[in-house]
């Protein structure tokens, strides 16, 4: 894959899982540069790229949603995440709360207490990261919510008018699907279709190369491989 937007490599250590963002057990962090590239490509597919509703139906610890929230806060009005793991959602909500002034201040105070107790260099670096994130966090996202939901089940999520669906699907040994039929991706897309703003929406799905992303309600706009991942962009048919 050739980067079209994130051409220059940057230092994204401020978004490292476990530094300022909380590290949810048995979850993986999403590469920030790749996430920015995908989000930038999503924005070019929209008629209007402001006041967007962003949703990740397989959010895990919401690492992806959180750094996207920091980097694209001027575009986003609401962020929603869902997952089937109730325990991991606790971390997801804590991460999304970092996008609020109160949540980031609370995290800063916690890191300062840790540094005062242990004088670890890692805590000092984390405090420096918080200060940089505070400068990024000038435009607050109005709505931040994580909820327990099986996106591969028989009902659609309790949200509406979603503009961007951006998700990294479960694959490998860490994460797994829990679906109502043999093709969880198709069922997921059936559910997603019902919550989209059909006049202004895009779906970006990251998955294993072997997974098939296809649904009659969507037109495939673009697909490309990046290492072991496949990224597919879909627009709903109207």
Image (cartoon, rainbow, N blue to C red):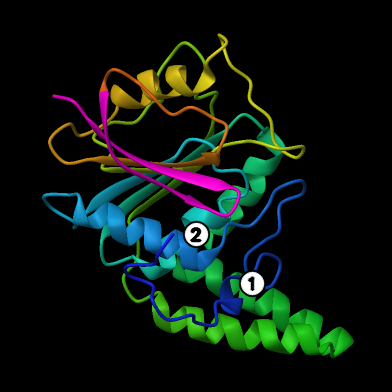
Q: Which residue is mark 1?
A: 20
Query: Which residue is nearer to you in this view: 99 or 23?
Result: 23
Q: In which quadrant is the C terminus drawn?
A: top left
Considering the numbered disc 1 on the image, is that residue within a helix, a strand or a loop?
loop
Quarter of the rendering containing residue 49: bottom left
Please state the horizontal and vertical placement of residue 237, each as a whole percent of the image: 18, 25
Q: Residues within 10 Å of mark 2 (few under 14, many from 20)?
A: many
Query: Which residue is nearer to you in this view: 215 or 195?
Result: 215
Circle number at residue 225: none
Please state the horizontal and vertical placement of residue 142, each as a whole percent of the image: 32, 56
Q: Main secondary structure of the magenta part?
A: strand
Q: Is residue 215 above or below residue 135?
A: above
Q: For the point 79% across and 90% down, which residue is it?
A: 121
- Which stretch did the figure color magenta? 218-238
Q: For the point 48% across and 68% down, which residue is it?
A: 33
Query: Which residue is nearer to you in this view: 81 or 106?
Result: 81
**Magenta-drawn stretch contains 60:** no
**Magenta-drawn stretch contains 222:** yes
Inspect this view and state whether residue 149 appears.
Answer: yes
Circle number at residue 66: 2
Q: Is residue 81 above or below residue 30?
A: above
Considering the numbered disc 2 on the image, is that residue within a helix, a strand or a loop?
helix
Inspect this view and state whether residue 152 appears.
Answer: no
Q: Residues within 10 Å of mark 1 (few under 14, many from 20)?
A: many
Number of numbered discs present?
2
Q: Is residue 13 above or below residue 97?
A: below
Marked residue nearer the N-terminal end (2 or 1)? 1
């Amino acid at each position: 894959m050739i980067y079209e937007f994130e051409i220059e490599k940057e230092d994204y250590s401020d978004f490292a899982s476990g530094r300022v963002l909380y590290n949810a057990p048995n979850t993986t962090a999403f590469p920030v540069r790749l996430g920015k590239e995908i989000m930038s490509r999503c924005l070019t597919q929209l008629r209007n790229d402001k006041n967007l509703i962003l949703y990740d139906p397989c959010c895990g610890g919401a690492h992806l949603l959180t750094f996207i929230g920091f980097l694209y806060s001027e575009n986003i009005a609401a962020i929603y995440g869902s997952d089937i793991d109730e325990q991991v959602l606790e971390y997801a909500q804590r991460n999304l709360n970092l996008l609020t002034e109160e949540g980031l201040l609370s995290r800063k105070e916690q890191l300062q207490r840790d540094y005062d107790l242990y004088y670890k260099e890692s805590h000092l670096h984390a405090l420096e990261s918080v200060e940089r994130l505070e400068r990024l966090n000038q435009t607050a996202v109005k709505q931040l919510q994580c909820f327990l939901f099986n996106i591969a089940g028989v009902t659609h999520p309790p949200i509406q008018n979603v503009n961007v669906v951006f998700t990294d699907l479960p694959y490998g040994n860490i994460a797994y699907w829990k679906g109502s039929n043999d093709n969880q991706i198709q069922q997921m897309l059936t559910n997603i279709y019902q919550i989209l703003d059909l006049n202004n929406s895009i779906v970006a799905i990251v998955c294993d190369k072997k997974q098939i992303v296809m649904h009659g309600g969507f037109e495939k706009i673009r697909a490309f491989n990046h290492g072991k991942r496949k990224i597919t962009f879909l627009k709903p048919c109207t």
